[in-house]
């Protein structure tokens, strides 16, 4: 009996101790949560609780990523999360080069077909030609497996100076052969240029990357050596990039001391960038082409030249992005691009569109410009008189919704017609041209580049018949209503595959209303 009483007391005491320990632990958690915490502390504390106390094992890394993505969705439309799958591609695009063998290719059925051998890459030196098939790379068979294009890219790219062994097949000579060479940096150009007419140069900037300033300076120097005194600067469909590159481009045209852009930080601090005395084209006539896809750094350049009365802006209202982002790492494989500042053009205007109706409405607004009638009538562009500013020469410019051109190019095209035009200038037509060219390369072996540019499409009807068949077989949603536009599109991609990007542009510009309008305006306006 005494033993039973003793054990009973032991059990009671143990229960009290355990209860005290558990109760104390719970009280500890309660006490911590009563302390005042800011947002960062709350999130950190929550993640610690999950690690220490949650009943099941969870992947806190994935959970943290989901939380970050949800938070970013609640911010402005231009802050976003970059997963590891996208980070390398975005970085190399902005860096201006990638490490690989230097070819562009299409997967035709189950085989890697070389479309172009990129200038400045190791494949050019090694002797690879357009039309070659890459069968094996470093003992990895690439044909007959239904591999994705990304699978091929992952195999052909790698670290700089690493060796790659290729087994290839060349249909033109019906031979198999092997090549061994090192991977190297291959340029991803952001600037294309050529003399469009005597005295008139053309420069296209497709993005503002690390290499853009250098590429642009080389283009300006080259065109000036060929007698350029007037310039068409094409910023259409340019989504932006590095602000520093945009400032350097604007500096090319502005005189020393003229304002380029003012950036306002999240602390309200303002810093203005001014032009230097190093401008290489401060006096020549300049026309800048923009459209609704010209955004960010493109608008910085267009706004700086418009507000300083340095250039005529031609085209359609730009996108309307007046925010500045910085890319910040989340570990080694992920990152975020976070909006950290606003920018203002030299007259003091912000061209940022409102986004208080949500991200979807914000991005839909660009497409809605067709339904509002703005694309066909500049009078229907929404403008707020309270956001009107005046340039030194007395021109009125507006903030709040992109850059409005000085010379508006009206378009009566429907969305369906715009879609057809987009298809004709897309990579789909590039693929079609390759499949046709690949069957009869011998027809183009002796052709001269200048003759090719000046003459109409060789055997045009044969190409058009082949395109109609291709569209039907691939079930492409395209109606060939404008055969002239289709012919120019085919010849432009043929020029790209036979020669280079400048050839493609010079042919494409025959049917380009923006470029043709700029040429008309340039010829009417004498140099100041």
Image (cartoon, rainbow, N blue to C red):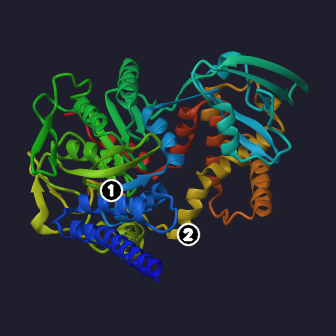
Give residue 349's quadrant in the image.
bottom left
Vertical position of residue 225 compared to residue 428: above or below: above
Give how far across and how far down residue 300 sits, in percent: 26, 45
Q: Residue at x 50, y 46 (%)?
A: 84
Residues 239 and 436: in front is 239
The quarter of the picture where the C terminus appears is top left
Regarding mark 1 in the picture, which secondary structure is present there? loop
Left or right: residue 170 compared with residue 518? right
Left or right: residue 39 compared with residue 242? left
Regarding mark 2 in the picture, which secondary structure is present there? helix
Tell me the CA gap for discs 1 and 2: 21 Å
Q: Residues within 10 Å of mark 2 (few under 14, many from 20)?
A: few
The numbered dot on residue 206 is none
Count of marks overlaid on the render? 2
Residue 379 visible (yes or no):
no
Give the residue number, with chain letter if any, for mark 2: 416
Give residue 245's quadrant in the image.
top left
Vertical position of residue 80 compared to residue 233: above or below: below
Which badge, 1 or 2, comes first in the chain's sequence?
Answer: 1
Left or right: residue 422 compared with residue 460? left
Give the residue number, with chain letter if any, for mark 1: 318
Left or right: residue 311 compared with residue 336? left
Q: Nearer the viewer, mark 1 or mark 2?
A: 1
Give how far across and how far down residue 375 sits, in percent: 38, 66
In the picture as drawn, the residue positioned furthest to the bottom comes out as 1
Q: Residues within 10 Å of mark 1 (few under 14, many from 20)?
A: many
Residue 149 visible (yes or no):
yes
């Amino acid at each position: 009996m005494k033993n039973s009483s003793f054990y009973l007391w032991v059990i009671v005491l143990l229960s009290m101790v355990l209860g005290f320990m558990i109760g104390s632990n719970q009280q500890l958690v309660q006490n911590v949560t009563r302390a005042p915490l800011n947002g960062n502390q709350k999130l950190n504390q929550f993640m610690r609780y999950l690690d220490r106390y949650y009943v099941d094992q969870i992947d806190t890394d994935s959970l943290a990523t989901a939380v970050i993505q949800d938070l970013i969705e609640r911010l402005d439309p231009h802050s976003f999360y970059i997963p590891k799958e996208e980070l390398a591609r975005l970085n190399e695009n902005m860096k201006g080069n990638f490490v690989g063998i230097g070819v562009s290719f299409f997967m035709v059925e189950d085989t890697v077909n070389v479309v172009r051998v990129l200038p400045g890459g190791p494949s050019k030196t090694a002797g690879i030609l357009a039309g070659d098939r890459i069968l094996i790379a470093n003992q990895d068979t690439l044909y007959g497996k239904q591999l994705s294009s990304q699978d091929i890219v992952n195999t052909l790219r790698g670290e700089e100076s690493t060796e790659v062994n290729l087994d290839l097949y060349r249909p033109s000579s019906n031979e198999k052969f092997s090549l061994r060479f090192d991977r190297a940096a291959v340029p991803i150009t952001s600037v294309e240029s050529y003399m469009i007419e005597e005295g008139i140069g053309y420069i296209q900037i497709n993005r503002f990357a690390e290499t853009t300033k250098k590429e642009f300076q080389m283009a300006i120097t080259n065109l000036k050596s060929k007698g350029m005194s007037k310039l068409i600067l094409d910023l259409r469909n340019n989504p932006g990039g590095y602000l520093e590159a945009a400032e350097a481009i604007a500096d090319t045209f502005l005189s020393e001391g003229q304002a380029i852009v003012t950036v306002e930080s999240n602390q309200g601090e303002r810093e203005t960038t001014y032009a230097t005395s190093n401008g290489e084209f401060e006096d020549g006539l300049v026309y800048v082409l923009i459209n609704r896809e010209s955004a960010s750094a493109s608008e910085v350049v267009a706004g700086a030249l418009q507000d300083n009365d340095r250039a005529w802006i031609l085209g359609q209202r730009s996108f309307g992005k007046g925010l500045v982002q910085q890319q910040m790492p989340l570990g080694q494989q992920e990152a975020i691009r976070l909006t950290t500042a606003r920018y203002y053009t030299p007259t003091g205007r912000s061209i940022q569109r409102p986004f208080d109706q949500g991200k979807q409405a914000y991005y839909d607004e660009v497409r809605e410009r067709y339904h509002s009638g703005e694309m066909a009538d500049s009078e229907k562009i929404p403008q707020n008189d309270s956001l009107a500013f005046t340039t030194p020469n007395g021109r009125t410019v507006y903030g709040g919704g992109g850059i409005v051109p000085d010379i508006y190019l009206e378009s009566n095209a429907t969305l369906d017609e715009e879609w057809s035009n987009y298809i004709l200038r897309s990579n789909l037509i590039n693929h079609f041209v390759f499949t046709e060219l690949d069957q009869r390369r011998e027809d183009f072996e002796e052709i001269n580049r200048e003759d090719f540019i000046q003459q109409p499409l060789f055997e045009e009807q044969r190409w058009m018949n082949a395109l109609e068949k291709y569209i039907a077989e691939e079930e492409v949603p395209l109606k060939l209503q404008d055969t002239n536009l289709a012919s120019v599109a085919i010849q432009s991609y043929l020029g790209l595959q036979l020669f280079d990007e400048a050839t493609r542009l010079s042919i494409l510009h025959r049917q380009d209303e923006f470029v043709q309008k700029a040429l008309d305006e340039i010829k009417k306006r004498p140099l100041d």
